[in-house]
Image (cartoon, rainbow, N blue to C red):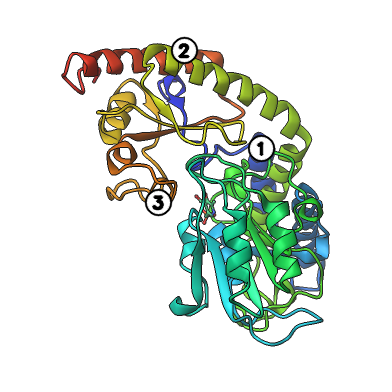
Amino acid sequence: MAERERAYFDWNATAPLRQAARQALQDALAVPGNPSSVHAEGRTARRLVEEAREQVAALVGGRRADVIFTSSGTEANALALTPAIETEGEKRPRDRLFISAIEHSSVRAGGRFPREAIEDVPVDAEGRLNLPALALALTRASRPLVSVMFANNETGVIQPVAEAASLVHAAGGLLHVDAVQAAGRVPCDIGALGADLVTLSAHKIGGPKGVGALIRARDDIHFPDPLIRGGGQERGMRAGTENVAGIAAFGAAAAVARAQQADEAAAMLALRNRLEAGLKAITPQAVIFGEEAERLPNTTLFALPGMRAETAVIAFDLEGIAVSSGAACSSGKVQPSHVLAAMGVSPASTQAAVRVSLGWETTERDIERLLNAWRKLGTALSKGSQGVAA
Ligand code: PLP
């Protein structure tokens, strides 16, 4: 009960398990078979995996046969980013990897490309990919691979993916899109995006942590150098007995996320707009990053000059409110956000950046609680004593 009293605003770090996913997880855990076995138990497990494959493909308008299940979004990104990626028309290695300067660390790591073959493409002050800079970069490669996220995990800013796809394809390149934060929150269609590959992660859409997928736009895209070799599962592109329960729950979450995307997005947007209006009314000097750009309906990254993000995160936590001071994987170690740095934000504002991310369980009462806590914090700051709200 005490748990329910907390208000959770860190949905971009991870979302709670959806009820349908929990049920699918439990049901699948009761199935003893290995999906590769031919007997009835094995066939039951296989059916669960293949149903989930269909559901996950449907979330991005893809085809069942083109889904490769992985252990995470991180692994899907690592699998995608290889010079060895082959298509029917092009089997020679890719010579360069271009990534937007605001990618998640799992893309920034560059997969199996050597460091010197990886190049950042800048973003503008609102955190949107600079398309002319991408066009120019593409002239420096003969067989490029490009990775552009659909929406940024810190700012929520939606990237001009379809425009990037036209440039990349005109240059003979392939486009990988990390849609981990966007899927389920905005319409996400692999064909409309023009992506060749799309990454998803189960735990951002209400599935369990530790399951992801790389979805190909066509079955002529191959990975002759899988990260994990062995039993030939996932069409030889990702060996290892499938995480049947995790995959079944991923599929269930994807089905609900797809069915409810429009309704959930509308509800989150109304709450997010109310939150931002409240923040500005309480502290007019607060800055919302990427405010002028198209953003996910659930994300606000803001800063109050003079307030350190850690102070705010701790003060909110003591009030029963979970927010984040940036990307989950970099909070804990105090590291300046590469996203805000790429947007040209000053180090002082970067250190003040607090991320509030909403989800399908967020209520008006949660928003009111957050705004009340912010009022206390803002008042404490203006009196020159940070942390009084704690
Ligand atoms: N890509 C983006 C944009 C993310 O926000 C995350 C997780 O925070 C990932 C990839 C990694 O996904 P996973 O946690 O499944 O490894």
Instruction: Say the numbered circle drawn on residue 33.
Output: none
Q: On screen, 176 above or below 125?
A: below
Instruction: Say the numbered circle drawn on residue 329.
Output: 3
Q: On screen, 216 above or below 156?
A: below
- The answer to which of 343 and 248 lies nearer the viewer is 343
The number of callouts visible is 3
- Per the image, the residue denoted by label 2 is 368
Q: As drawn, is 41 to the left or to the right of 111?
A: right
User: Where does the image place residue 359, in percent across and percent down from the top left?
Assistant: 58, 30
Graded by Cα atoms within 10 Å as few (under 14), some (14 to 19) or many (20 or more), the crowding at tag 1 reads: many
> Which comes sooner in the sequence, label 1 or label 3?
1
Mark 1 secondary-structure assignment: loop
- Per the image, the residue denoted by label 1 is 185
Any part of residue 281 in sight: yes
- The answer to which of 290 and 200 lies nearer the viewer is 290
Q: As drawn, is 175 to the left or to the right of 326?
A: right
> Which comes sooner in the sequence, label 1 or label 2?
1
Cα separation between marks 1 and 2: 23 Å
Report the residue that reaches farthest toward the bottom: 92
Residue type at the position of mark 3: Cys
User: Where does the image place residue 362, in percent across and percent down from the top left?
Assistant: 55, 23
Any part of residue 33 in sight: no
In the rendered image, the quadrant that contains the C terminus is top left
* Residue at figure coordinates x 34%, y 13% from the top left: 375
Residue type at the position of mark 2: Glu
Q: Does the residue labelled 3 lie within 8 Å of ligand 1?
A: yes
Q: In which quarter of the image is residue 324?
A: top left
**Marks 1 & 3, CB-CB < 8 Å contact:** no
Cα separation between marks 3 and 2: 28 Å
Mark 2 secondary-structure assignment: helix
> Which comes sooner in the sequence, label 3 or label 2?
3
